Amino acid sequence: MSGTYLCFRVSALKIHSSSPAPAAPARRGPWQADKEYQDSFVRSEGWLGADGAYSLPLNADRTLWVFSDTVAGKPGGPIAMTHNSLALETPDGFEFSEKQAFTPPDGRGWFWVYDGAPAQQQDHQQLFLGRFENAPGPEGFNFRFVDSWLADVKTGADVEDVEVTRYRKLSELLPGVRASEGAALHFGAAVCEDEIYKYIYGTQDFGLSKQLVVARVPRKEDLMASDHWEVFQDGAWGKSGAVSSLSDGSGKALEVANELSVFPRDGHFWMVTQVGNEVRLLRSTRPEGPFEQTATHQVREEHPGSFSYNAKGHEQEIDERGLLVSYNRNVLPFGELVAHPEQYQPQFFRVPLG
């Protein structure tokens, strides 16, 4: 039971001090539910729900969705769990696969999936992974972060065609880079690019507090092969030493979640993140900030034991209603998830960028 429950991540690493409260999201003003997207994730068998929910556009018509802990089966059970899964979105809808796509090559621990970017090779994507393993602690919290990895994946016509071609530890690309004392350092929470660089955002994780950091690689270089990685530190870019947390508009360290999104648009770098029950929209004129908050939205869940975390935007889905934003939803205790796997489906709404 403890091993199964462990897969169901209820973690200070991934959930930023969110507590159960009432309602399907209490959407006020212009932040509106996207029923079409929501209905695409309602399933009667097979893939039933997951968290993570990063989206990687492959071309104008196809998007690869990557998830972390995943439940599959039929509502009411039996329910199986894997540590990650995939879906392919096309004009015809979503094709889900509950099969675990990423496994540490040395067999130690498991991978949760983060953001990614197109590789230099056609039909390849490169995704960031966080490796975790069992550790002493209360049930549901008995794991720890180990290290960060990159995976190169080859895509195909169907979701089952996606295959990992190679893995690489991120520490091999960032030798000498370290976090502040007492923090775990992870990159891959969000990836975006401008005309010159790919920017890889991450977190210094102090437990209940997570602070934003950023690295960069020349845009035309392979993330898994480049020897030109740099991290932002003390107002400049460097190759080794301690990273610096990015700031908010007041000069304080910006507080974020372990999963988020950043994308360039109209001369700004936009960010979506979630702290507690509050989804925050921020922007900056520079990739390294400071990021100033432009709008917030409180989300609530009415199902007993349900809670929300790790909101992010999907920049390829912007229309007259605004940016598509999702947040992860989960439920405790584990038996409640088995009985109501729909509580593990990401929730979708639109956020104006004006």
Image (cartoon, rainbow, N blue to C red):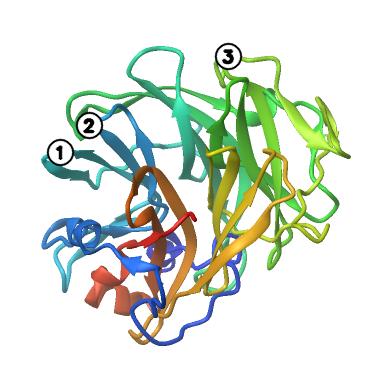
Q: Position of residue 155 (x, y in %)?
A: 29, 24
Name the disc covering residue 61, or none. 2
Q: From the viewer's side, name the closer residue of 60 and 306.
A: 60
Q: Label 3 near label 1: C-beta < 8 Å?
A: no
Residue at the location (39% across, 70% down)?
330
- Front residue of this view, candidates 345 and 59: 59
Q: Do tag 1 and tag 2 residues touch (Cβ < 8 Å)?
A: yes
- Count numbered badges in the picture: 3
Task: Determine which quarter of the picture holds residue 292.
Answer: bottom right
Of mark 2 and mark 3, the one earlier in the sequence is 2
Distance Cα–Cα, label 2 vs label 3: 25 Å
Image vertical order of residue 61 relative to residue 256, above or below: above
- Mark 3 sits on what residue? 221
Residue drawn at x 18%, y 55% is 40
Residue found at x 27% / y 62%: 34
Residue type, label 1 = Pro
Q: What residue sits 27% from the left and 29% below the top? A: 60
Q: Quadrant of the N terminus?
A: bottom left
Q: Nearer the viewer, mark 2 or mark 3?
A: 2
Q: SS at mark 2?
A: loop
> Would you say 31 lies left or right of 202 here?
left
Residue bearing the label numbered 1: 91
Q: Residues within 10 Å of mark 3 (few under 14, many from 20)?
A: some
Residue 153: image location, x then y, percent: 38, 25
